[in-house]
Image (spheres, rainbow, N blue to C red):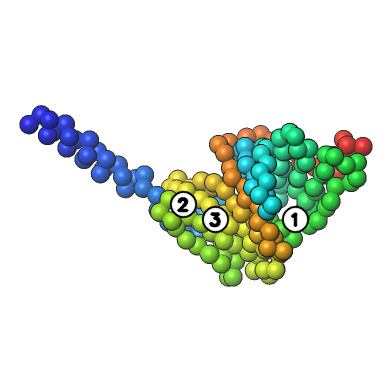
């Protein structure tokens, strides 16, 4: 009898706890609220490039509008966004960074001050695979710029990775590690002019 009770009790506990921890499809409103709640994020990342090569590094996000990718050696590249611009620094070159407007990249969709995935024609995919919710979004006014596919787990909601598909069809995947949120970040991390001055 004691043995039966010993077997049943853990089973009952599992059944009681399962609904609270079970993954479920996250709504667009849940995801929007989560993204808007993020102020600063620091995380290790692994990047899978369109040619199949793999890079690693540390990412810094400060919403709205600021992001920085520091790549680990042997790479010397640095990608950063601030002041409405994206700058790509090539550590092997003394040339100025390649720059373009942040609004011309799908990454801008999660760096906006107010993320609203319910906007008309913004979300072109919203699915659940039993473990994670994947949302594919585009700029409704400039769909030709490409898409960003975001993968979340939860509840509680957590961003795990994104895939950016560019205008030319190339795909870049960024997989996030252990995210630290709400950490203090100096403004200089996202200042393109100051980074350029430092490299002169």
Label drawn at residue 132: 2
User: x%, y% of residue 176?
Assistant: 58, 42
Image coordinates of residue 140 in percent, x first then y, are 64, 69
Is residue 145 placed above or below 46 in the rendered structure? Answer: below
Marks 1 and 2: in contact by CB < 8 Å?
no
**Residue under pointer 1:** 102
Query: Are the residues flagged by discs 2 and 3 in contact, CB closer than 8 Å?
Result: no
Which residue bears the numbered disc 3?
32
At 66% from the left and 49% from the top, the residue drawn is: 52
In the rendered structure, which disc, 2 or 3, sits on the residue that comes first in sequence?
A: 3
Q: Disc 3 on helix, strand or loop?
A: helix
In the rendered structure, are the residues bearing label 3 and label 1 in contact, judged by CB atoms less than 8 Å apart? no
Q: Is residue 143 visible?
A: yes
Alpha carbon distance from label 2 to label 1: 28 Å
Q: Residue at x 47, y 61 (%)?
A: 127
Classify 33 as above or below 2.
below
Q: Nearer the viewer, residue 167 or 61?
A: 167
Provide the secondary structure element on which disc 2 rests. Answer: loop
50 on left or right of 132: right
Q: Is residue 61 in view?
A: no
Q: Which residue does the image show at 91% across and 45% down from the upper left? A: 95
Label 3 Cα crowd, 10 Å radius (few <14 / some 14-19 / many 20+): some
Crowd tier of the residue under label 2, counting other residues whose Cα lies within 10 Å: few below 14, some 14–19, many 20 or above: many
Query: Of the residues tagged 2 and 1, which is closer to the observer?
Result: 2
Regarding mark 1 in the picture, which secondary structure is present there? helix
Give how far apart the Cα atoms at labels 3 and 1 are.
20 Å
Drawn side of residue 35 relative to residue 66, left or right:
left
Q: Position of residue 59 (x, y in %)?
A: 67, 40
Quarter of the image where one finds residue 94: top right
27 left or right of 141?
Answer: left
Q: Residue furthest front?
A: 52
């Amino acid at each position: 009898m004691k043995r039966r009770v010993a077997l049943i009790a853990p089973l009952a506990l599992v059944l009681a706890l399962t609904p609270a921890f079970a993954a479920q499809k996250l709504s667009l409103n849940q995801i929007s609220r989560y993204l808007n709640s993020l102020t600063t994020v620091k995380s290790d990342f692994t990047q899978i490039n369109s040619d199949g090569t793999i890079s690693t590094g540390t990412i810094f996000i400060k919403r709205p509008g600021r992001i920085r990718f520091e790549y680990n050696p042997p790479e010397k590249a640095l990608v950063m966004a601030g002041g409405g611009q994206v700058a790509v620094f090539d550590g092997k070159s003394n040339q100025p960074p390649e720059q373009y407007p942040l609004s011309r990249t799908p990454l801008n969709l999660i760096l906006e001050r107010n993320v609203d995935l319910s906007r008309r024609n913004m979300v072109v995919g919203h699915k659940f695979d039993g473990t994670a919710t994947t949302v594919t979004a585009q700029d409704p006014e400039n769909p030709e710029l490409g898409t960003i596919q975001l993968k979340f787990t939860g509840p509680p909601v957590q961003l795990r990775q994104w895939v950016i598909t560019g205008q030319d069809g190339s795909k870049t995947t960024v997989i996030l590690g252990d995210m630290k949120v709400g950490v203090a970040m100096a403004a200089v991390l996202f200042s393109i002019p100051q980074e350029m001055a430092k490299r002169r």
